[in-house]
Amino acid sequence: MKSLIYSLITILVFTACVETEFEVPDLTETESIPSGTEVSIASVLNNLAQSSEPVISYRDTDTYITGYVISSDVAGNFFRELIIQDAPENPTAGITLQLNQNALYSIYEPGRKVYVKLYGLAVAEENGVVQLGIRDGNGITEIPASLIPKTLFRSTEMAELIPLSVSITDISANLENLYISLEDAQFNRREVLDESPKTFAGEANDEFDGIRLLETCDPRGTILVSTSTFAKFKSVNLPEGRGSISGILSRDFYDDFYILRINTVESFSFSNPNRCDPAELQCGLAETEGSTMIFTDNFQTQTRNTPITGNGWTNFVEYGTQAWEAYTATGTNASQGISARIDSYQSGNPLSVGWLITPPIDLAAYSEVRIRFETSSSFADASELDVLFSTDWDGTPEGVTQANWLVLGDAFVIRDQDFFGDWYSSGIVKLSCATGETGYVAFRYTGSGAEAADGTYQLDNISITAD
């Protein structure tokens, strides 16, 4: 019996000592290129641009496009969409894919090369940018999760994304859906330097997106940074400094203006504390108006409820749809006959910026030039009215944002704490210390369509005089 037990033990020990061969799994990722013919993203965009139809469907085709991922939903600022461009550096074309899938960043990271089969897809312009998805009438909808593995193929290539450095003056449809960078940029001083600095999208009036005004210093210009209220960084304060920003150029939901969308707060490098906020022109106040009238307007010849025109005025809408218009009102907040008014109440615009600019003032021909005007409001709320002065504006609407505008710091403008039913004089503001031969005074309104920032401003009785 003992011999049998020893024999069994020996067999077990011998068996345990024998090296058993197992199949080691191959963890090497292989390139999965779809069969068919490669076409460029640019050709897809051109086909749509040249088509008389709003949607192009891809049927009976073996074509595919190649691109590099530039968006990421890791911080929640993108949702069920993947944006790709045709090269990791110096791209020329980009497109958005609508995908019914979350956590795309875990598979399709920024810089990842991908292939997209066009069979069964459709291309259309949605919210102002060209997108791929499944046809849905005269538009498109998300590619179902079940079709994504048959449509979107992940390459083994991971490239370093180099944002395309552009000037604010280069912003156009040609750069939509591209990863770009703007240098020498900063958020508007009211966004970050007021007593209550703003967050990316965490304010009470941020309903779906936070819209923040970004400006560049040289050349001067503005663009909007849009952040989803579902973004993880929505409650982070905007950076105060000045520097570079990298993001994807897109359009707002209503296709009214260009926006930048960022992946994370690391898209900013605002390390320069020296901001380029507008300087002030402070020549002081005069006790009396001049004896010579250069320009005057009380708006009595304007047509009610229509934009201000004529008499040399430039009525320029920078953002939104709201222009300065003529109006008449009675009651507590009465107008003075016909006055000029601007507001953003119920406009539907996430941001409204409207300019009313005087005709040119000949500073060389007159001495001791000064201006006086009156303002009122229907609760300014979070809107603002700036009075600005420039000697280098070229007189064109396109050149408004490129000019150097100084703040007329001596001019009084009604404040939110002032009684909304009264009209307030600016004082007689001297312009005599301005350098240049020709000057312009601008009344720039900045407001939001949000309920808590729907302020209204009124303007009347402008007079520019000299000795």
Image (cartoon, grey):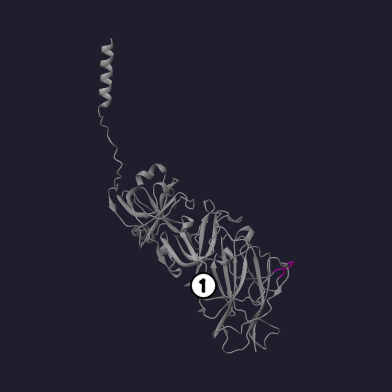
Q: Nearer the viewer, residue 380 or 357?
A: 380
- Which of the 4 quarters of the picture holds residue 90? bottom left
Vertical side of 159 occupied by 7: above or below: above
Vertical side of 146 occupied by 226: above or below: below
In this rendering, would 31 be left or right of 407? Answer: left
**Crowdedness of circle 1 by 10 Å Cα count: few (<14), some, many (20+)?**
some
In this rendering, would 445 be left or right of 62? Answer: right
Residue at horizontal 68%, vertical 85%?
Answer: 289
Q: Position of residue 378 (x, y in %)?
A: 68, 65
Q: Which residues are magenta?
A: 329-334
Q: Secondary structure at mark 1?
A: helix
Is 24 a magenta residue? no
Residue beneath disc 1: 401
- Which of the 4 quarters of the picture holds residue 326? bottom right
Q: Quadrant of the C terminus?
A: bottom right
Q: Residue furthest top?
A: 1
Vertical side of 97 occupied by 408: above or below: below
Q: Is residue 62 visible?
A: yes
Q: Position of residue 172 (x, y in %)?
A: 43, 66
Query: Which SS does the magenta portion mostly show?
Result: loop
Q: Nearer the viewer, residue 438 or 124?
A: 438
Q: Quadrant of the N terminus?
A: top left
Q: Position of residue 421 (x, y in %)?
A: 73, 68
Identity, as a three-letter code, of the amino acid under mark 1: Thr
- Which of the 4 quarters of the picture holds residue 88? bottom left
